[in-house]
Image (tube, rainbow, N blue to C red):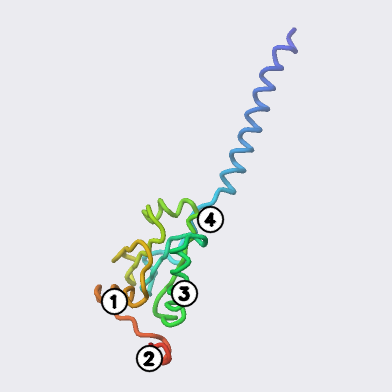
Amino acid sequence: MYKRSWIPVIAGIAVLAVAYFVISTFSATKSTAPKPKQSPAKVTLPKIVDVGAEKCIPCKMMVPVLDQLKKEYKGKLQVEFVDIWKYPNAGKKYGVKLIPTQILYDSKGKEIARHTGFWPKKDIIAEFKKHGIKLDPTNAKAKGK
């Protein structure tokens, strides 16, 4: 009879151990927003972060704009894309309720503007300029555009 009283205790411990293993495995593999490459205090370039999804139609329309910004302002502007479907916590991190949302930061990492929906390149550059950040294209070919 003494040995039988330990069976429920051992079974309970085993269940708790399995539950702990499952929970710790789930938390370790759960998607989180990517960490910025630099902390805001070390950022030296203005930045645009586009929070969207690869399969969202307006988000797809932003891809060529982001690619042009990346190419034309290389070394003068950081361009980042965060896929909210791959990193579900990004919505909370960036305070995004609709996609695509573009967030502009100055060189100190302070948010200076926010836009939801498709945003043409010329309007993005104008918004930086409105906040005192003049971006000159990196190459002469882009200047003619």
Callout 2–callout 3 Cβ contact below 8 Å: no
Question: Which is nearer the N-term, disc 1 or disc 2?
Answer: 1
Residue 64 appears at what percent x and percent y? Answer: 46, 74
Nearer to the camera, 83 or 57: 57
- Which amino acid is tagged 1? Ala
Check residue 86 in the rendering and tell me which mark sits there, or answer none: 4
Question: Which is nearer the N-term, disc 2 or disc 4?
Answer: 4
Disc 2 designates what residue? 144
Residue 27 appears at what percent x and percent y? Answer: 56, 44
Q: Residue at x 44, y 78 (%)?
A: 68
Report whether 4 appears left or right of 114: right
Question: Which is nearer the N-term, disc 3 or disc 1?
Answer: 3
Label 2 residue SS: loop
Label 1 residue SS: helix
Residue 116 appears at what percent x and percent y? Answer: 35, 61
Callout 4–callout 1 Cβ contact below 8 Å: no
- Which amino acid is tagged 2? Gly
Q: CA distance from mark 4 to mark 3?
A: 20 Å
Disc 1 designates what residue? 126
- Which amino acid is tagged 3? Pro
Q: Nearer the viewer, mark 3 or mark 1?
A: 3
Check residue 98 in the rendering and tell me which mark sits there, or answer none: none
Check residue 64 in the rendering and tell me which mark sits there, or answer none: 3
Report whether 64 appears left or right of 133: right
Which quadrant does the C terminus fall into? bottom left
Q: CA distance from mark 4 to mark 1?
A: 30 Å
Callout 2–callout 4 Cβ contact below 8 Å: no
Label 3 residue SS: helix
Callout 1–callout 2 Cβ contact below 8 Å: no
Nearer to the camera, 63 or 112: 63
